[in-house]
Image (cartoon, rainbow, N blue to C red):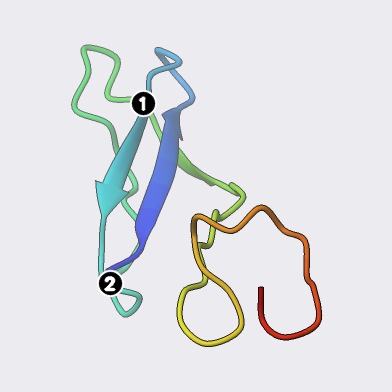
Amino acid sequence: MPTYVYECEACGAVFEVEQRITEEPLKEHDCEQRGRLRRLITSVGLILTGQGGSSSSSGSCSPGGG
C-alpha cells in the first residue's frame, strides 16, 4: 500500500498516511484551524534484489558475477 505525505495549509503539520491508490485524497486536517490538506510529491526509494543485484551490493560489476 502506498504512503502519501500530506501538509496542512493552516498549521503546517506534515504527516504520512498509508492509503490505497483507489482512495480519495484526504481533504481536511483535524487541527484547531481545520486546515485544508495538500498532498506532497516525494521521491521513492527502491531496493532491488534478486538476480543481477542485491541490496548489499557495492554497485560495481565484474565479469563472472562477482
Percent from the top left, x then y, of residue 12?
45, 15
Relative to 65, say whether 27 is above or below: above
Position of 23 relative to 46 (above/below): below
- Which of these two is toward me, 21 or 53? 53
* Residue at 36% across, 26% down: 35
Label for residue 5?
none
Label 2 SS: loop
Name the residue carrying label 1: 35
Percent from the top left, x then y, of residue 5? 43, 42
> Disc 1 vs disc 2: which is toward the camera?
2
Task: Calculate the distance from the C-alpha at mark 1 to the C-alpha at mark 2.
Answer: 20 Å
Instruction: Name the kind of residue labelled 1 in the image.
Output: Gly
* Residue at 42% in and 39% down: 6
Q: What secondary structure is found at the residue carrying circle 1?
A: loop
x 40%, y 34%: residue: 36
> Dot 1, how many residues are within 10 Å of its Cα: few (below 14), some (14-19), or many (20+)?
some
Where is residue 43? Give x, y as percent.
62, 50
Q: Of callouts 1 and 2, which one flags the residue occurring earlier in the amino acid sequence?
A: 2
Residue that appears at 40% across and 51% down: 4
Indicate the quadrant containing the C terminus: top left, top right, bottom left or bottom right. Answer: bottom right
Residue that mark 2 sits on: 23
Q: Residues within 10 Å of mark 2 (few under 14, many from 20)?
A: few
Would residue 58 appear left or right of 7 to someone viewing this image? right
